[in-house]
Image (cartoon, rainbow, N blue to C red):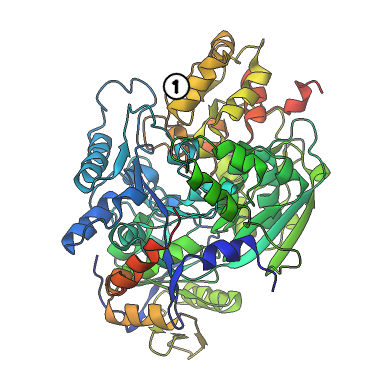
């Protein structure tokens, strides 16, 4: 029988199938960070367990780190304690640790691929829902809770029921100003914030084949925002080219052996999915969200739908628009904004900074806008400087900050003040996500850049030449 | 961390019909800085329960005296979406709740609940509406959640629906066991499997 990419990777990691229960699922790679791991170590120690395969776990500080003055002690004592706890736990159990200030530090979902830890056909988990990012390489990658972090530390397995399989095909060519972020926000708007709950998604078709690895990461990253456990894309020559020579990828004969396996990782002709959807690239515009979940998105030039045009959920819909201080039928273009955030595990990579710079080059940041430009890692910072993008950024009136999760979830000091409107390249527009009372519009780096220089929500196509 | 066994629970319930309640609402990120499981009950639904000056919002169901002490929360569709933070499930449990009923749950939140001793009970949209209507009509409405028989019942009228849970997770919940107990008992099998992994 023809099998799917998802089946191939999943089935090869099942240690045991529990009768009328979950699979005992083996984990190849485990990322931990300072927020969701401390209690797992407490649990581990209270049971008298140890870390069974420390070489399979990678500790990275990111959620709680400051994005200025990283060379100074962290001021917030609670944040400092979490960062310190991560380092101590890593040291105690022999786990590699890229803490604050380490040259390899950055957002866990940026540094994993960057350093070749993420591999095709691997299973990858982290106590973070955007672990789905790593699916861009043909890995099965998803977020877990702290109990499961403890399971992986102490047994290298978790107990998981196999999700159903969905394939989403997007064919055709993307238009001017339409980025991977827009493709993802378009799909999520179609699926709603819960449409793929219970599924693992494979993305296929021209658009993903043509997409760069970084673009694929952006798309897979956002899989969770339609409820999917994860998303994946079959590895191809772009994947292998990206990986070859990175610090932790297999080398020499091991690489050749790995390649033999990786080349088998695709969905066979005729394989069946529990659900399948087809979308056309030409239908996708630069996107923006207007509500309080990522499914509430639309083309940037469109108007906010009326409650009556939706199926059910009118009270929730009105509550959401009320929080945003928007009205049904409002146009988003032209709304005055206060903040712009470029960064996060969704859009904090070099291509995102190149896209942002393609618009702000030769222009000036609008006076009413406060902008936080936060690269996803130190390697991204280095690349920004190597390409001279830092000069473009500075000349246009922006400031480059230091790496971390930053205003995506506002655990550090990068909080959008109550009531302020932010155009953000991150992944969630939930109430208060970027700070209590903050209002978030999710968009691509191009929309963020165009809005940053105009001071209002702007269609980037008006500033781009074909 | 161990949790109390779950067998049969009869309780009044907090109604929260809002859909797509995400885990950032259940426990906002700024309260995730602890390195131990403490105070998550206090910050449970922090920004929906309290004004920015710290005073309680009187009309929020968790603040209404009439529901106080309930061990069940009936939530709107797609409850627990978003972040994987298990702190959300901890805050449910630590607030004193043992069961969340909804017509749909987000996957990670559901898993987290099962791992910490909160029973997620998925009912049909129609039965969820029945429960909300019953609570609105009488805030003291008692709901019986019977895990051995996998049923949820409105005590006053006898209206009932069965719910799904796999045998493995059900046994865990009935006995207060968790997955690590199971996994540690198959260490040799796991280490043999690990030997076969190419990377």
Quarter of the figure with residue A354:
top right
A37 shown above or below A242: below
Categorize mark 1 by other alpha carbons within 10 Å: few (<14), some (14-19), many (20+): some
- From the viewer's perspective, tell me whether residue A52 is left or right of residue B16: left
Which residue corresponds to mark 1? Answer: A401
SS at badge 1: loop
Where residue B93 appears, x then y in whole percent? 31, 65
Query: Can residue A319 be seen here?
Result: no
x, y (%) of residue A263?
63, 53
**Which residue is pictured at 35% across the width and 82% down the height?**
B171
In the displayed structure, B47 sits above or below A457; it is: below
Q: Is residue A452 left or right of residue A269?
A: left
Comparing B21 with A325, the one in front is B21
Q: Residue at x 49, y 82 (%)?
A: B163
User: Nearest the camera: A308 or B96?
Assistant: B96
Q: In the figure, is residue A281 to the left or right of B58? A: right
Q: Residue A353, located in which quarter of the rendered image? A: top right
> Furthest-front residue in view?
A253
Report if residue B26 is visible in the image.
yes
Give x and y (percent) for residue A35.
33, 45
Q: Chain of mark 1?
A: A
In the rendered image, residue A308, in percent from the top left (x then y), is placed at 74, 57
The residue shown at (66%, 63%) is: A166
Viewer-nearest residue: A6 or A334: A6
**Quarter of the figure with the N terminus of chain B:** bottom left
Quadrant hosting residue A211:
top right
Tally the numbered discs.
1
């Amino acid at each position: 029988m023809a099998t799917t990419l998802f089946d191939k990777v999943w089935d090869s990691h099942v240690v045991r199938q529990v009768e009328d229960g979950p699979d005992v699922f083996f984990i190849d790679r485990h990322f931990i960070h300072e927020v969701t791991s401390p209690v797992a170590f407490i649990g581990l120690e209270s049971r008298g367990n140890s870390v069974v395969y420390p070489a399979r776990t990678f500790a990275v500080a990111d959620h709680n780190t400051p994005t200025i003055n990283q060379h100074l002690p962290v001021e917030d004592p609670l944040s400092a304690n979490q960062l310190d706890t991560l380092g101590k736990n890593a040291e105690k159990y022999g786990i590699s640790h890229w803490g604050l200030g380490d040259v390899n530090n950055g957002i866990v979902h940026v540094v994993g691929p960057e350093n070749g830890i993420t591999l095709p056909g691997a299973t990858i988990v982290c106590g973070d829902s955007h672990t789905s990012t790593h699916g861009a390489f043909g890995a099965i990658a998803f977020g877990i809770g702290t109990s499961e972090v403890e399971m992986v530390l102490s047994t290298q397995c978790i107990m998981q029921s196999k999700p159903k399989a969905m394939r989403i095909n997007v064919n055709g060519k993307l238009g001017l100003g339409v980025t991977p972020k827009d493709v993802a926000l378009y799909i999520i708007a179609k699926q709603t914030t819960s449409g793929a709950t219970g599924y693992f998604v494979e993305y296929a078709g021209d658009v993903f084949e043509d997409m760069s690895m970084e673009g694929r990461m952006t798309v897979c990253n956002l899989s969770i925002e339609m409820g999917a456990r994860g998303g994946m894309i079959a590895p191809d020559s772009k994947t292998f080219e990206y990986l070859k020579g990175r610090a932790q990828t297999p080398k020499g004969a091991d690489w050749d052996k790995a390649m033999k396996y990786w080349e088998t990782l695709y969905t066979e002709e005729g394989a069946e999915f529990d659900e399948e959807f087809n979308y056309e690239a030409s239908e996708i515009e630069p996107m923006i969200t207007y509500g309080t979940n990522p499914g509430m998105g639309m083309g940037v030039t469109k108007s906010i739908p009326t409650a009556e045009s939706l199926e059910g959920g009118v009270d929730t819909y009105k509550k959401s628009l009320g929080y945003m201080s928007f009205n049904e039928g409002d146009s988003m273009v032209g709304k005055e904004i206060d903040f712009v955030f470029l960064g996060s595990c969704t859009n904090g990579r070099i291509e995102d900074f190149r896209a942002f710079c393609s618009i702000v080059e030769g222009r000036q940041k609008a006076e009413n806008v406060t902008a936080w430009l936060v690269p996803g890692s130190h390697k991204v910072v280095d690349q920004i400087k190597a390409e001279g993008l830092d000069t473009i950024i500075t000349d246009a009136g922006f400031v480059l900050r230091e790496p971390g999760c930053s205003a995506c979830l506002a655990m550090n000091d990068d909080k959008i003040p109550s009531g302020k409107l932010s155009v953000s390249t991150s992944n969630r527009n939930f109430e208060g996500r970027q700070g209590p009372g903050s209002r978030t519009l999710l968009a691509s780096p191009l929309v963020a850049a165009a809005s940053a220089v105009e001071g209002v929500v702007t269609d980037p196509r008006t500033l781009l030449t074909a | 961390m161990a949790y109390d066994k779950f067998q049969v629970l009869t309780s009044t319930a907090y109604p929260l019909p809002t859909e797509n309640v995400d885990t950032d609402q259940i426990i906002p990120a700024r309260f995730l800085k602890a390195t131990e499981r403490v105070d998550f009950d206090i910050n449970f639904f922090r920004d929906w329960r309290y004004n920015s000056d710290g005073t309680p919002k009187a009309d929020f169901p968790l603040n209404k005296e009439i529901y106080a002490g309930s061990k069940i929360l009936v939530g709107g569709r797609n409850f627990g979406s978003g972040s994987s933070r298990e702190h959300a499930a901890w805050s449910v449990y630590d607030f004193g709740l043992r069961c969340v009923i909804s017509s749909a749950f987000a996957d990670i939140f559901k898993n987290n609940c099962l791992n910490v001793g909160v029973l997620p009970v998925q009912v049909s949209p129609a039965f969820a509406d029945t429960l909300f209507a019953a609570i609105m009509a009488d805030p003291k409405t008692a709901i019986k959640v019977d895990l051995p028989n996998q049923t949820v019942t409105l005590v006053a009228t006898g209206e009932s629906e069965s719910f799904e849970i796999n045998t493995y997770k059900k046994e865990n919940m009935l006995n207060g066991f968790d997955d690590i107990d199971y996994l540690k008992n198959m260490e040799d099998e796991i280490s043999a499997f690990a030997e076969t992994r190419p990377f």
